[in-house]
Structure formats: structure tokens, C-alpha cells
Amino acid sequence: MLQINHDTHHKLWCGPAAIAAVTGLPTSTIYQVIREHRLAGGGGKRSGEGIIGWMLVSEVLHALDALGVSCKSNRPRGTLKRFLSENRDGTYIILAGKHFIAVENGNWTDQYTRNPAPISEIKRPKCRVHTAILVRC
């Protein structure tokens, strides 16, 4: 997992931050892919919006695919703490408590940390995991 390269003047949101953390790409590239997808009508109820704020899981999956990153999505049960204790290997983008984070090898990051931090410092370990996206399958 890499440090997030936020190279735009836009506010950094959790979805683009998580994608940047696992791909190493600058957020400007990620914002462009998402914007094109939404303007083409692929963003569901977000279609047509050029401003990137919160994201749908389907948009994260589309952005990863468009960037050439292989991934696999699942819907695990339980809390973030439980998921992380059972899934120590691999690189994940996790949606927990309406917030995307990137996790790899005992470290995590989001738009607030921007640099990988130990999982022991995770902010809300009791949040329910909605979706886990295994990246680089």
C-alpha cells in the first residue's frame, strides 16, 4: 500500500483515497475515471454528476476495472475488527460504516491518515463491514 498522492485542489474523499492507496495513482487520474463514468450515465443515481463526493461500491469497482486493476468483491459478515483479524493477507478496499478504507499487511489508510498506519490505530473497529474488495487477486 502506498502513500496517497492527492494532486488536485478538490476535497479528498474516502473512495478516491482508497483507490489511490492501492494503485499508487494520483487522485487526479482517479477523479477523471469516475467523472467520465458518471457523465456517461454509469453512476446509477449519481449519473451526470461531475463533482466527486461519496461513491457507490459499483463506482469503486468500475474505477478499478477501468484502471486495469483486478479485484473481487464480497459481502462479509461482522465488524471491521473481526474482518481484519480473519483476513490478514491481501490488499483490500473495505466499506465499513459508509466509509472506504484501504488495508494491506496490517496497515490501513484513508483520506484523513493519507499514510499507512497500523491496524491497531484504526478509528472505528466496531463498524459493520458492508463490502470488502480484494485487490490484486
Image (cartoon, rainbow, N blue to C red):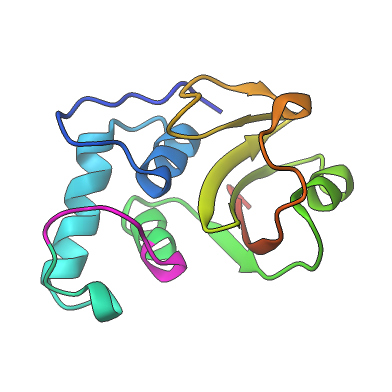
- Is 106 located above or below residue 94 in the figure? above
* Residue occupying the point 35% across, 43% down: 13
x and y, in percent, of residue 97 in the image? 60, 57
Q: Is residue 69 left or right of residue 72?
A: left
x and y, in percent, of residue 133 in the image? 60, 57
State the extent of the magenta-drawn residues as a range.
50-59
x and y, in percent, of residue 95 in the image? 57, 56
* Residue occupying the point 11% across, 72% down: 48
Q: Nearer the viewer, residue 98 or 100?
A: 98
Q: Quadrant of residue 105?
A: top right
Q: Is residue 11 magenta?
A: no
- Is 57 located above or below residue 90 in the figure? below
Q: Nearer the viewer, residue 39 or 67?
A: 39
Q: How many marks?
A: 0
Q: Quadrant of residue 44?
A: bottom left
Q: Is residue 91 left or right of residue 80?
A: left
x and y, in percent, of residue 110 in the image? 50, 35
Q: Nearer the viewer, residue 92 or 13?
A: 13
- Is 59 located above or below residue 51 in the figure? below
By secondary structure, the bulk of the magenta-drawn segment is best described as: loop
Q: Is residue 113 left or right of residue 29?
A: right
Locate the N terminus by quadrant.
top right
* Residue occupying the point 75% across, 43% down: 125
